[in-house]
Image: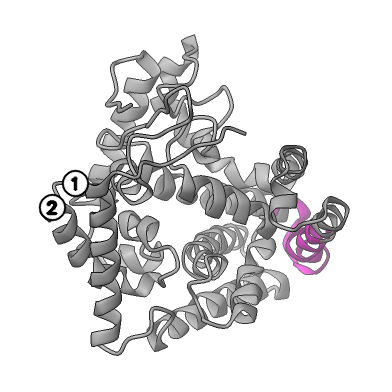
Amino acid sequence: MQDIRFSRDKGQREFAMALRKRVNDYFQENNISKYANAAMVTKTVVLVGTYALLYGAIVGGFVTNAWLVLLAWTALGIVTAGIGFSVMHDANHGAYSRNKYVNGVLGWVINLIGGFAPNWKIQHNTLHHSFTNVHGMDEDIDAGKLLRFSPEQERLWFHKFQHLYAWFLYSLMTHMWITTKDFKQLVRYHRSGLLEQHDMSFPKVFAELIFVKVVYYIYLLVIPLVFSPASWWITVIGFAIMHFALGFLLGCVFQTAHVMEAAVFPTTDEEGNLGQNWAVHQLMTTTNYAPNNRILSWFVGGLNYQVEHHLFPNVCHIHYRHISKIVQETAEEYNFPYNTLPSFRSALRIHWNMLRSLGTGQPMPQIA
């Protein structure tokens, strides 16, 4: 894995220090914890409770009409996305609670929605948050050969159609999680030494992965097949639809934050040096959207404030809207970009355009 070094430019360091101080002052002066508050706890109860009710309705046979059963499975996928965006995401960043055991328990929820916590922490926390949009380091922009998310990737003939078919592939994302991805990813992290860097033993973590997948399939597929009064094929279709909805939502929310026209895809020099420090790197590779849409922000766990999340991943998302003003003002004061779009629809439209540009090989914004 490439050894990458961020810039130590004085002006960029001053920006990062000023921003950190101003955000810390906000919490101290208002006597606010950076972790979850009562509203966040209520949100957690609502999301997890809704998930339990939907699961109970499917397994317990409280809905019997085939179309209503499929609707319940679809709703389960949507609620699962909400839990992933809000509860699991914050917890695995250590941002939900100052108590690491609370974060550990809530972070483990990803295992119950199809993922695997150890892999996710390495891919998301370590690689994506450290080296956002850097080809060969950020696995969030590495979707294999089917999708070209970076101008550094090889462009193949079929990529010119990716703005059309990418949305279907997004819906397959968690289907891959629950089948092959986690196993391949764990082996790759073991071979690259990333597991050892995180004090993880491959045999132990591999055994945990097997256990997690068995539990997942038992509770979310086998039990409904056995106890739901719906036909077995309705259950199987419902399970697939749930993952279509979940994957599609995850893809749309995360990819519209980074694979965008305003975001850059930084490259390093021969010695592995980037032209900006970590904080400025996050500003240049990340895009916010729909800052005034409270309903969307509630559902996606504040991930429409992706700039704030990348700069302060250890702050609970419930605070992003408030600190966004500080971040924007500080970035503008130091003449650094603060990328934001007025709506989620505009973000999807620009992401569509970006996919088409990458697919046809049109010139993209680049920095050295």
Secondary structure of residue under mark 1: loop
Horizontal and vertical percent for residue 88?
55, 67
Other-residue count near label 1 (Cα within 10 Å), few / some / many at <14 / 14–19 / ≥20: some
Horizontal and vertical percent for residue 305?
31, 59
Secondary structure of residue under mark 2: helix
Horizontal and vertical percent for residue 266?
37, 32
Whether residue 132 is in magenta: the answer is no
The residue that label 1 is drawn on is 336
In the picture, measured across the screen, residue 217 lies left or right of residue 67, that is right
Q: Residue at x 71, y 43 (%)?
A: 189
Horizontal and vertical percent for residue 314?
45, 68
Quarter that holds the N terminus? top right
Q: Amino acid at mark 1?
A: Phe
Stretch in magenta: 212-234
Q: In this view of the protein, which residue sits in the foreground, 234 or 239?
A: 239
Q: Mark 2 and mark 1 in contact? Answer it, CB < 8 Å.
A: yes
Q: Residue furthest top?
A: 157
- Magenta stretch prevailing secondary structure: helix
Calculate the distance from the C-alpha at mark 2 to the C-alpha at mark 1.
6 Å
Viewer can see residue 274: yes
Q: Residue at x 40, y 62 (%)?
A: 300
The image quarter containing residue 306 is: bottom left
Q: Residue at x 77, y 37 (%)?
A: 191
Whether residue 223 is in magenta: the answer is yes
Q: Judge whether 108 appears above or below 131 on screen.
A: below
Q: Which mark is residue 332?
A: 2
Viewer can see residue 62: no
Q: Amino acid at mark 2?
A: Glu
Quarter that holds the C terminus? top left
Q: In this view of the protein, which residue sits in the foreground, 190 or 210?
A: 190
